[in-house]
Image: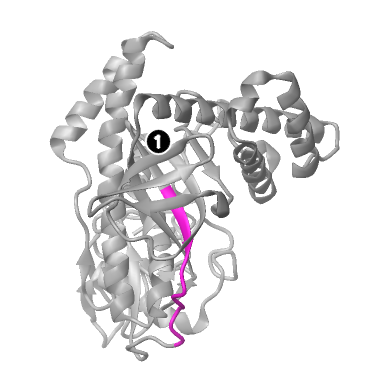
Amino acid sequence: MLSGRKYRLALDAEQESMCEEFGNICRAVWNTGLDQRRQYRRRGAWMNYVPQAAELADAKREHEWLKAAPSHVLQQALKDLDKACRDHGTFKVRWRSKARWSPSFRFPAGNLITVERLGRKWGRARLPKLGWVTFRWSRPLGGEVKSATVSRKGRHWCISFLVSSEEMTPEQHALPDTAVGIDRGVKAAAVTSDGDFFDREFVTPGETKRYRRLQQQLARTRKTSRNRAKVRARMNQIAGRVSHRRGDFCAQTAAHLTAKNALVVLEDLKTRNMSKSAAGTAAEPGTGVVQKRGLNRSILDKGWHRLELALTSAARYTGTVLVKVNPAYTSQRCSACGLVTEGNRESQSVFVCKAAGCGHRAHADVNAAVNIRNAAGHAVSACGDLGISRSVKQEPVGRATGQTPEKGNPPHS
């Protein structure tokens, strides 16, 4: 089984300068390769990794600054670019901006990497051209090193090892007859069909206030100035703490859910599409832009996609099966009798079935989670029959009067 192990590096001034240089060279190679691919596509031709790798070897003979970074690190940057272009399309791959992109580079040859433990808290690794780098030994490696990625997060440098261990995914879960449905929302990050609520605040009010003040300072600084770099570094420090809390929450929640359940059912949500701006274009301006902006911020703050990734990773260690189902009408269907109507959900948290003789009452998110769990028997793709003509997780509007969902009813919850 392949797993990742991430540690914080303790670099000296020379090594930190070299890492910055390697990252800048990889960024230049990425941007140059992407520009070349786009020029070829505009002419109706195609450029891939093999000719670009050959041209990189020629470019290193002409430009001395390219020789500062190891060759296989630059080749790996071109491989990553090739994969990104094949997965997303050449014109949808982003440039790597010096201001917005954090330096990162990968050593793909595990046989050239040596790792040693120095004591209870420290270890070191020998990397090509960087030499021995010291890192905080916060957990055992647990396998053979296949590759190493050096990256900067805020003001800290980290190293991530890809290790191969002999651990295998269990053929069967320890509790084979257990199942749970998970409803992701903006009030609570995750609500289960068992009635459990998982949520926490990732950013404190003080951090929100400081970040807003820093944004105002950033707007008053001159581009490429030192003051701008200092303000951006302070902003990244706050954003990094928030990201770490969100990642810790998702990892703990995923470990808890996969340990207790052999089947975990999620809605097949397209988070990227759901958090798009409603601004529209100059010719056709959007409506409800401010409300949509707040909804997008709430969706991204709760880490829906990150929780899904954490569940996928944790399921490998317990044998849990992860299933995604069509999200259509899960928040409007009664889990007791199956009646679907927008009147069932009286508010964001109250669900009362309007069917005669039913009257089922429950927390709206718990009712939706039960529907998600029950739908696992006939899971379909989110682009399948239901919901084909509208965005996922969107409540149907009134057909006769054209009324919109109730204001207190976010369409994604």
Point 31% across, 59% down: residue: 250
Q: Which segment did they paint magenta?
A: 160-171
Q: Position of residue 260 (x, y in %)?
A: 28, 80
Q: Residue furthest bottom?
A: 177
Secondary structure, mark 1, is strand
Image-quadrant location for residue 59: top right
Q: Can see residue 190?
A: no
Q: Label 1 sits on what residue type?
A: Arg
Closer to the camera in the image, 77 or 276: 77
Image-quadrant location for residue 195: bottom left
Point 32% across, 88% down: residue: 175
The residue beneath circle 1 is: 152
Q: Position of residue 45 (x, y in %)?
A: 85, 38
The answer to whether residue 114 is above or below residue 96 is: below
Point 62% across, 43% down: residue: 76
The answer to whether residue 15 is above or below residue 126 is: above
> Is 188 situated left or right of 263 in this image?
left
Q: Residue furthest right?
A: 44
Q: Is residue 170 magenta?
A: yes
Image quadrant in which the C terminus is located: bottom left
